Amino acid sequence: MNWLTNFVRPKIRALVRRKEVPDKLWIKCSDCGQMLHHKAVAEANFVCPECDHHMRLGARDRFKGLFDDGVFAELAVPAVPADPLKFRDSKRYVDRLKDTRAKTGQDDAVVVGRGRMGGHAAVVACQTFEFLGGSMGMAAGEAVIAAARAAIEDDAALIVVTAAGGARMQEGILSLMQMPRTTIAVQMAREAGLPYIVVLTDPTTGGVTASYAMLGDITIAEPGALIGFAGPRVIESTIREQLPDGFQRAEYLLEHGMIDMVVHRHELRETLVRIVGLLRNRDTRMSEVPDIEAADPEPVLPEPEIVEDDAVAVEAIPVESDVEAPDPEDDTVVEVTATDEGEAVDPPEAEPDDIEVPVAVEPVSGDETEVEVEPEAVVDEETPPVDPELEIPEPVAEDGAPKRPDA
Ligand SMILES: [Zn+2]
């Protein structure tokens, strides 16, 4: 309005703000409630020295603890259209983004760093929960894809550190599209023969769990991290049952086979370096391969032929011998005679195989005294063409097409 409001007041405000700055000096542990000095907590990599609670960690702080000497280069992520849906809830999405960027110093939830871990090339994509709940929007999808491409370019291990409440609602279906996109990105890295390792931190839920978070060759979680698709409260109210203690926590999931290991943040770097080393050490792999190849003759096939000798009795021999002798008596049906002798043979030999064979043949021998045989079988052989199913349609067809219940 005038010189006072436009010029003097902002200046005064700026001065006042500067005095308020000692902002992050003390941090309150969200688990045990202890007030902790920021510096001490930062040195402990944001693990509470009192209760060992793993606090949420920004991407850059995370990188410092992971890469060799904390040295990394941040990867430029392709820009995405801002607010394509012109979304507005209590606040415009554009404004929300602007505020969050100012607060976190990040462009979006996922930041990608490339560097070395234990001397191995590594690309790490890290999700920051502070940035709109780590939600996966177009930018996050783009960052994961860029990370996969960079890993392929560098021939590096791809590591993703997740922390997310799910997809970003303000981008609607465009955020959901990041699920298949990131899945394909992971597949690209896999096809390039690169290890893909996931570190799940508190919390990892929703669409992130439903895509790249669960695709790791190795899946690691930080202690106590909440990991799941729908949250426990939603599940509880849906199935109306009380969930067990520790449900969806890292330790519970390890016990139930969902993840490979739970690793303390202080040991995370060592663990990752060790895993990457195991998966990337090509010299070791190459030396082992030739030994395996050398022992590949093909002796397996002839074995089944040898078995035939033992099984001879089952096939034809008993039946054929029976057939030859009786032939002179009845020329009409060969099989009938076979049963005659089958009867004679059964008592002396008493072999299970012989007993079974005559039973199968007997149907034809219905002429003979044997009552045991099924009469049905005899009928079938005498009148082979007769099938109960075929008889039924005939009467209908005989009179011609017009004769149907309708007519
Ligand atoms: Zn604590």
Image (tube, grey):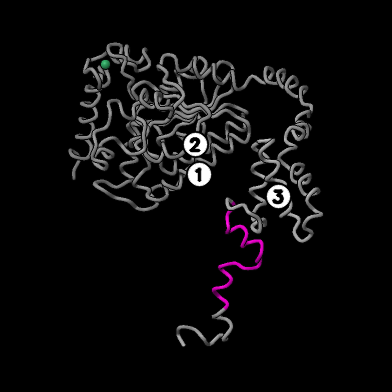
Disc 1 element? helix
User: Taking 117 as reference, is 249 left or right?
Assistant: left
Residue, disc 3:
340
User: Taking 309 as reference, is 121 left or right?
Assistant: left
Disc 3 element? helix
Q: Is residue 51 above or below residue 383?
A: above
Give the amino acid at mark 2: Val
Residue at horizontal 69 percent and vertical 36 percent from the top: 348
| Residue 380, magenta (yes or no) | yes
Point out residue 11 in the picture as x, y percentages from the top left corner: 23, 31
Give the amino acid at mark 1: Arg
Q: Is residue 331 above or below residue 403?
A: above
Is the shortest distance between ligand 1 and the CB of mark 2 under 8 Å?
no
Residue at horizontal 36 percent and vertical 20 percent from the top: 223
Disc 2 element? helix
Q: Is residue 210 above or below residue 45?
A: below
Magenta residues span: 373-394
Q: Earlier in the sequence, mark 1 or mark 3?
A: 1
Residue at horizontal 37 percent and vertical 50 percent from the top: 172
Question: Along the line of sight, which residue is nearer the eye, 156 or 286?
Answer: 286
Residue, disc 1:
181
Q: Quadrant of residue 36?
A: top left
